[in-house]
Amino acid sequence: MLRHLFSASFIVVSALAADRPNILWISSEDHGTQMGCYGDTYATTPNIDQFAQRALRYTHAWAAAPVCAPTRTTIISGIHAPSSGSDHMRSLVAYPAGQKMFPQLLREAGYYTGNNAKEDYNLAKTREVWDQSSGQAHWRNRKAGQPFFAVFNSLKSHESQTVRPGAKPIHDPAKVRVPAYHPDTPEVRRDWALYYDSVTAADADAGALLAQLEADGLASDTIVFYWADHGSGMPRSKRWPSNSGLHVPLLVHIPEKFKDLRPADYRDGGTTDRLVSFADFAPTMCSLAGLAPPVWMQGHAFLGQFIAPAQPYVYGFRGRMDERYDLVRSVTDGRFVYLRNYLPHLSQGQHVSTQFKTPTTAVWKKLYDEGKTTPAQSIFWQTPKTPEELYDLQNDRDEVNNLAASPAHRATLGKLRAAQQAHSRRIRDLGFVPEGERLTRAGALAPYDFGHDDAQYPYERIFAAAELASSLQPDATPALVKLLGDSDSAVRYWGVMGIRMRGAAVVTASRGVLNSTLADTSPYVRIAAAESLGQFGNTTDLAAALPVLLALADWTKNDLFTALAALHALESLGTAKIAFARATILALPGTGRSPDVRYDSYIPRILEKLRADLGAEAAPAADTKRAKRKAAKQ
């Protein structure tokens, strides 16, 4: 009897699946809208330009983050990465209880799901997501008559393609449009030309897949998406959550056979100004497959049976980028871009070792240090950042004229600020708790589940503390000192950070309470206090602060996140203040306990930078061998 019931159920699922469209995703790495179909006459992208003539082109699609892992995590889950605690690049945290990655839902509905081949998720993968996830995955491997969801990702346009010593670009460097934030040098022009070459190579990969689909006689049965995972791999695009880092190409072709799944404004060769977020991809795939998007998904379907109303805003973020922390949130309405800097004492151009391999980064930093950059070119390196930034894309495509202080734009600033704050509350953004502490607090729970329990994560108190601390309001010191007595360690952390971010005068006035805070139960509060005293206090304060940081920087005696935070604090003090502890710093280990291989290379990178700053040789091979071997497997 059970066998007959199972067989009947399988027949129903198969019949439903047979009536559903195939879905093909063609994705590429690290490139924005630098394509002919988006009006870039310097670009050479014949295949996607031709595809655009029979597709709907989205003019306002935003990636979730300006790097791959957190943005792909947002896509696969339908959950904004700061909500699931998967916002840091790279990381690995538990999946929210009771939720599934969307390809698993399609697979359960009868689809063949194939991923060729990148995953790179910051969330631990749920079971049975893909039928195949490898370089061999292909729609041709499905069962006869089975609909497919197939993903193909091109690596040809990745940031690494500009790091090719001796490479001669095909695109003419003399014809490059150098954005206002970059210096106009031969190195910069060469890198931009190589970037355009790499986009052409990704376009060729897309063309080959479209030709395969046509040759297999599947074009009329398949909905095709073309998108890139975030903006260009050039510095101030990759890793920065402004329009230059988040604006991506998105083109969708829906065959006539499935015209009922098209949005009202669909036209072959047409455009739409509907705002699309990468959080919208998962519910949209469900909608196209005839599945009602699960209530846990935070995005909005923009195609299919369950299409949702257009949204007024889309959102971006920046968390830790490899070995460097930052906390930035962004929002756009399609014309204006608003950024909220919660750690304004850190520059946009922190020393991320991978980014400094790009020749543009090195020459740009050199010119800035020599005082040879324009005001627009200097923003990237300057500290402090302003707590708020506002840019008008219609009149300032390069986002270099900050309108946050403009009286004429006060209403726009307030509207976008309110949108960003409301979004943060809605998703219960976990970014306001230090990375290690959020994992400790969550314990056996997924960070998402911890974050949605107000008893464990008093969001409003912590968020209010972060807002006050990072506002840089000069009259906030008494309120910040009061935060140091709060029962929640994250609130105390923001109290200390608020004092530190206001500089020498406020730190000096708060010396007594900061010295007391060196004994706080939270290592992150202790580190923030020690950094403040070491950077802005007197010699007695430095003598008290350094032992705290040195003890917490030892990875063999502390967890990875504590050691990483302590090393950042030591580095921020500058070589003159840490020189007498040189021997201790050089002896710090580059290996230790780690939650996952994805984290293992970050402490060795900071130690390498510290050793270079202190005039020492590179780390012994024993310190970095394990981390490099594991990082190579990512």
Image (tube, helix red, strand yellow):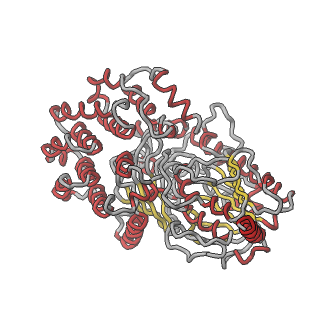
Residue displayed at 51% across by 61% down: 98
Q: Is residue 515 above or below residue 337?
A: above
| Residue situated in front as seen by the camera: 369 or 260 | 260
Could you tell me if residue 401 is visible in this image?
no
Determine which quarter of the picture holds residue 339. Answer: bottom left
- Using residue 303 as the reference point, say whether residue 531 is left or right of it: left
| Residue situated in front as seen by the camera: 151 or 178 | 151
Which image quarter is the N terminus in? bottom right
Determine which quarter of the picture holds residue 49. Answer: bottom right
Residue displayed at 53% across by 67% down: 299
| Residue situated in front as seen by the camera: 592 or 68 | 592
- Using residue 440 as the reference point, say whether residue 352 is left or right of it: right
Residue displayed at 69% across by 54% down: 151
Residue displayed at 33% across by 63% down: 454
Most extreme residue toward the front, as rendered? 1
Q: Residue 58 in the image: x percent, y percent?
A: 63, 67
Q: Residue 362 in the image: x percent, y percent?
A: 50, 36
- Using residue 557 as the reference point, say whether residue 427 is left or right of it: right
